Image (cartoon, grey):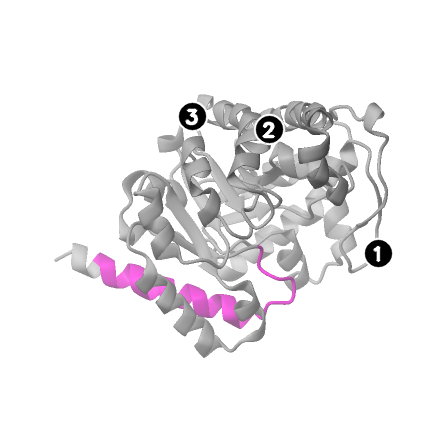
Amino acid sequence: MLDLRKNRFTKYLLGRKKSDMPFMPIVTGDHASFISGVKRKDMIASGKVMSDSLITAQEEYGLDAVFVFSDVYVEAEAMGVKLHYADDEFPKVIDLPNPSEIRPADPLQDGRLPEMIEAGSLCLQKFGNRSEVFVVLKDPFSLSVLLNDPEVFFKNCLKDPEANKNLLKISEDNQLLYLQEILQTGALPLIGAPYTSGSLISPALFREFVSPYLKSMIKLIKENGNPVIMHICGDTEVIINEIIQLEPDVLSIDELDIGRHSKLLSGKTMLMGNLSTTLLLKETEKQVRKATLKLFESMNSPCIPSTSCDVPRETPKNNIHAMLNVINNFRTSISRIDQG
């Protein structure tokens, strides 16, 4: 199925030719809505508004992929978390569901899940083979953290592991339902796992509370002929063996040593990342070009040049264009070499 997709991301993943290297900073609904002149609140609530914003961003930057993502609470809200919305802020939790009442949501009816599915579908209709469309969803562990008081959930990994595992199973069931609908659209899922970082949990806890509930999602993605793409915030080096066991096709990493990670992964998993989003937001075009060149120099195996996390909302457009210029120059020079 993957070889039927003709965009640059899939060509690069399958063939690993440097001349096919995609331009994939993690541009989500947040930055896209900003450059479109849309309030964050409106983007968060509407799949149509999000897709229009992402289409604007793709056309502005020539992106080889867009990422359907608004905020971390999409699935948790559909399962009962109450949120407060303000015009230009991310939603804030105002109430958590009773643990005994948490059930899997209907991805076609509950909360904003249908809006995310619609956004992915609309982007696919617009782009065709021009750009890849990723719909971001959580891993079961991170979703469980968001359905709970995070401090209580982390403590219960040691104090009351069975309570956590019961919630993890419900989260797993929810994500499988949501994942199935994402796959039906033709978009590629990207598993965002913000709370599984080695900065927060040990390898032993990863093996007990993360891997068992993530494997079913990975299995479903692969059974549908699609690559498994994961993004993990924070330190991934301490849990690298656990990640290897999951066999993702692409691992998007934070501001870490991408060359060292490539060696640790032994080429089995393609890395994606990891230009500093703080630099992209705050520094000059010249510094962005310099940092992008440095990123290329540190890559010792095929990698996807991207950002370390979501592109910040108010990132200057010129800085993203500066990153693109470096990648375009690299692709052009490689093509000339290939042509002889």
Say which element carries label 1: loop
| Numbered tag placed on residue 16 in the rendering | none
Name the spot of residue 241 as percent of width and height, x first.
Answer: 42, 38
Label 1 close to label 3 by CB (< 8 Å): no
Q: Quadrant of the N terminus?
A: top left
Name the spot of residue 12 as percent of width and height, x first.
Answer: 33, 45
**As drawn, is 133 to the left or to the right of 86?**
left
279, 26: nearer the viewer: 279
Count neighbours of disc 2 (C-alpha within 10 A) and say few if under 14, some if 14 to 19, many if 20 or more: many
Residue found 45% across the figure and 70% down from its top? 322
Mark sitting earlier along the chain (3/2): 2
Mark sitting earlier along the chain (1/3): 1
What's the residue type where badge 2 is placed?
A: Leu
The stretch drawn in magenta includes residue 215: no
Judge whether residue 23 can be spotted in this image.
no
What's the residue type where badge 1 is placed?
A: Ala
The stretch drawn in magenta includes residue 317: yes
Say which element carries label 2: helix
* Spatial separation of the CA atoms under disc 1 and disc 3: 40 Å
Say which element carries label 3: loop
* Spatial separation of the CA atoms under disc 3 and disc 2: 14 Å
Q: Which residue is mark 2?
A: 179
Magenta region: which residues? 310-335
Q: Which residue is mark 1?
A: 86
Q: Which residue is mark 3?
A: 225
Residue found 81% across the figure and 38% down from its top? 81
In the image, residue 16 sits, relative to residue 330, either above or below, namely: above
In the image, residue 30 sits, relative to residue 276, either above or below, namely: above
The extreme front residue here reads: 159
